[in-house]
Image (cartoon, helix red, strand yellow):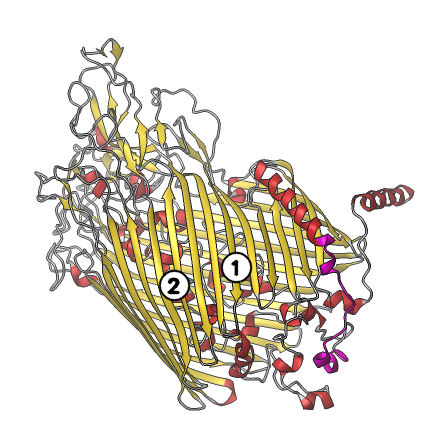
Amino acid sequence: MNKSSKQLLALSALILGLVGAGSAFAADTFTAPEKDKVCVACHDATSDKPILELYQTKHGSKADARAPGCQTCHGASDGHLKNPGTSPDITFTKNTKSSADARDGTCLSCHQKDAKRMFWKGSQHQARDIVCSSCHQVHAAKDKVRDKRAQPEVCFTCHKEQRALSNKPSHHPVPEGKMTCSDCHNPHGSAGPSNLVKDSVNSTCYTCHAEKRGPFIHSHQPVGDNCTNCHNPHGTTADFLLKTRAPFLCLSCHDPSSHPGNVPGIAGNVDMSKNRAGTVLSTTTPSDNNNTSGVVGKTQGLSCMNCHTDIHGSNNPMNSTRALRFWR
Amino acid sequence: MKNSAFSRSVIAAAIALAFPAGSAMADEAQDQANPNRSQATLQIQNLNQVNPLYRMYSGMDRSGTVGSVDVDLVRRSEDGAWAKLQARDLGLRNQELGASYEKQGDWKIGLDYNQLTKYAPYTINTKVGGVGTDKLNLNTDWRSSAGLGGESSLKLERTGTTLSGNKTFSEAFKFNFSFKTEDKKGAIMSSSIGSTWNGANTATPTKNYGTMFFTPQPENFRHNQFEASLDYFTRNLQLSGGYSGSFFTNNNNPGLNITPGNNAIPTLPCSAVTCGGTAIAAGASGIPWISLPPDNKNQQWYLSGAYNFTDSTRLSFKLSRDHLTQDDSFIPAYGAITPLVGTPISATYTQMNPPGVPYAAGITNTSLGGVVDTTAYFGMLTSKLTKELDFLASWRYENRDDKTPQRNYLDAQASAEYPAGAMNSRESHKLNRGKFELSYRLPAGYRLTGGFDYEQKKTPATMRDQVTEKTYRAELRKSLSETVTGKVMLAHSDRDGGRWNLLDGTPAAGATTFSTSTGVAAPLQFSDRKRDKVKLMVDWNPVDPLNLQFFVEHAKDTYPFNPPSGNARMGMTDGSSDLYGMDAAYRITDVWRANGYYTYNKNKTHQNELYTPRINAADQACTGVTVTTACSPWQADLSMEGSVFGAGLQGRIASWDVGAQYLYSKDKTRYNINFDPNFPTAAGSSVPAGAGVLPDTVYSLNRLKLYGTYAYSKATQFRLDYIYDVRKMDDYTWTNWTFSDGTRVNVNPTQTTHLLGLSVMQSF
């Protein structure tokens, strides 16, 4: 166990002890709030639709006067009270008859007062009738979508392509639970594209990859334009989250003077001394060995980036085209 | 049996001693409603061996048994104060700890610590010294056949600490802040071009151009991010004004210094075989400085808000101003270019003593002085025009103004390539992005939506002048049904941006001229694109315990571009994308549940290219203007195909809560390269033998997870985990590849991992 682990463990134990010993937090015996008693009378611990876990959440805090009662969200539901076989006025189940506006409106009557939900109206989700309860489990003690490890499972209910991509060999640590969808996206809407947490793709990426921000002496235009020109952040088969492996990715823009148009090949297969028909090539020089940009050097290893090292931009002031070409 | 019972008693006694029994809850209702919990989990995991593909984000880089601790604590007081502590994987290299204290509706403060280590998915044998630092040493004996030493690896470790909080002053005002500092340390895979010399111990060695060295770039970064905002809310008006600052520091030198193989710079006088009596060793040469990311900082001030004109008409907006600066010190300059002694070493391949790089004649500044200001306006109007008809319109305007002083960083070149030298690039742009949507509610839960998306980006004074994309889409959605819901969506988009420069070097009308001379990665192309897309998704509940989802997506791209007569048609020509699959979830009983899914995806592209033979070391034959025998056209058909199957089962056996998860994922990429059968003939071609033959690359993942949890008492639980993980990688990337310094990268084609875990969960 390393030093930082020991320190964190000790800190956790200390906090656990201090807070656990605090009498101010002692548990009492549960009694439902007065406004909910009519509901809890049936929806008790033995009900097939139990709701008591809600009292573990902020919605169930008696000390907060703003906390809603059952009828705040579900409506007065007189019909349901008289005949439990009928539904409450507003329900949030998957097959509900309540409109999306009615369900959303219930939550937004309180939760719109949050800058992070300012752009909910008109967002991709809202405009497609995705409502709060499509993702959030309000009655549950632990809301799955607010748990970093469990959240992708909720998002993947609809986002199937992203689920498939997350299993590719090159991926962000989402399947491992160290990063989650909401690190980059605000599902409640934003002023940026694709519900991104920042105003652009690049500014979102820079929250973790600020070294790519520049500006540089020599910039590579697609880098500053949009990281997703070359990368797919949800996962790829090519290394470094590249959408297609080099040189094919690079060749979609760079043609063909100098060496970009050279035919890819791999070590062991390629013989630079003769052509495809077996004719000995007179132009072969020692420079045309396998590790140059001729064939193998642009295909294997880091491919084009074997030489174009600073592909995100070079801040080298050297008086040489080597900096311009992102070699240095 | 007796032994078994005895064992259980011993275990029970041991646990009772180790963990004091938790207080029993009064009743079930109290259990369900009580927010307070304190749980510590001790995990012991045994890893059979370290497999790089499995290890990547696992936090475990050695085999054998490791221990870690999770902590979960929540306390709520009578007056609505919450204290929370959550720790995950304490003891591993990806540990997390978060603590917060909150008076609900009043104020909150939180502290989080996160560590994340990413290990490279391969191992390395190298003699390159100083990996992870900003001084690499290629070693004097880099070409010897001596062993490369043991296997090593590359890793990057992030450690971040965040302090955040908020305070509600009244019904209307709230203040929020967060400060995050993150360190990132380690090294990433990187290579650099250099040159080598044949013929040691001779006065006339031969230079090998363009050899590639293993030169991993070090990362020793600190990134501080500070955010603060003040929110104001009334029933119809919401405002949030704030500041967001991002300060990036690279603690390394501005350049990565690579000591060449023949670091011992010879001293005069030289003979045919020695300089100053020391043998002239063969070794790597080249300019030894690679620039590393410069410090930079971006600060944003913004005002966002929304106003409800009526209950159904709302305007939301964001106004922002970003100020980005980059004034990190350059790699130092040295004036005179001092070549290595003797011929034929040219002046451009310089030594590193004294340290630094040559500057162009007019460069006296010691930093770029980069300044970029970005002003952005975003607005979105939503309204319910009638009971059935919804309207949405949004617009974003962004003006990125790169004010960085422009200087000539390259002296005029004798070649046609840069006759006037080259200025530092500036990246200004003006962006307009709009969205319009009408949505009509039809009877029976149907909704019909039509939309138009528009995006135009102007980038004056750069190679790509302007890109415009228009998308038209229609969607029919069915909701509010107990059995079947779903949607079908059609979209067509048209991207126009390829007119800026034709392949013969003639700029299109209004476009920026750019040289197509040899030696630059030009002519570039950015193709126009037409994309048609269809999406279908159905959610079906045929019977109560069964839910099925079906989904199909198809997209087709074409790149309409007709080069002038005599020019080759290069770049992307067409492509397609397919995705389909299904999900199923079945509640077998109240206790047992099963789920499964299958997803298939395939992306195909076709691109045309043109082979360019080297006539000599410094020049090439083809510029793309004409197709000749020497310049052979070829095409690549790429096909990326993937399928994923997942299944899960969970339930209870006796006193055990058990579960199983299985995941199978396979990706196959095909690289089908074809030569034009007519042009040129194979006999006249200078395409090397064996080029154009790339094997398929295949990656597969098979993973089975089994777990079982046993409640020994209300307070104490045991959990067993077993993971069987097999990954197969058949990829040519590193196969038979050797860096010019001898470094090899190894990927074991089959990596099997067994992980066995035992956890004890104790509630207090």
Three-letter code, disc 2:
Ser
Q: What stretch is highlighted in magenta?
A: A20-42
The residue under label 2 is B577
What is the CA distance from the residue labelled 2 to the residue labelled 1? 45 Å
Picture coordinates of residue B649 (x, y %)? 67, 60
Query: Residue at label 1?
Result: B165
Question: What SS does tag 2 mark?
Answer: strand
Seen in the image, is B382 located left or right of residue B521? right
Q: Which of B541 and B225 is in front in this view?
A: B225
Q: Residue drawn at (56%, 56%), measured in percent from left and top?
A: B110
Mark 1 belongs to which amino acid? Gly
Q: Report the chain holding disc 1.
A: B
Residue with the most extreme right position: B2
Q: Is residue B203 above or below residue A165?
A: above
Query: Where is residue A317 shown, x and y percent of the image?
Result: 22, 39
Residue B428 at x, y percent in the picture = 23, 58
Give the mark toward the camera: 2 or 1: 1
Give left or right: position of B191 versus B579: left
Q: Is residue A29 magenta?
A: yes
Query: Is any part of residue B31 visible from this angle?
Result: yes
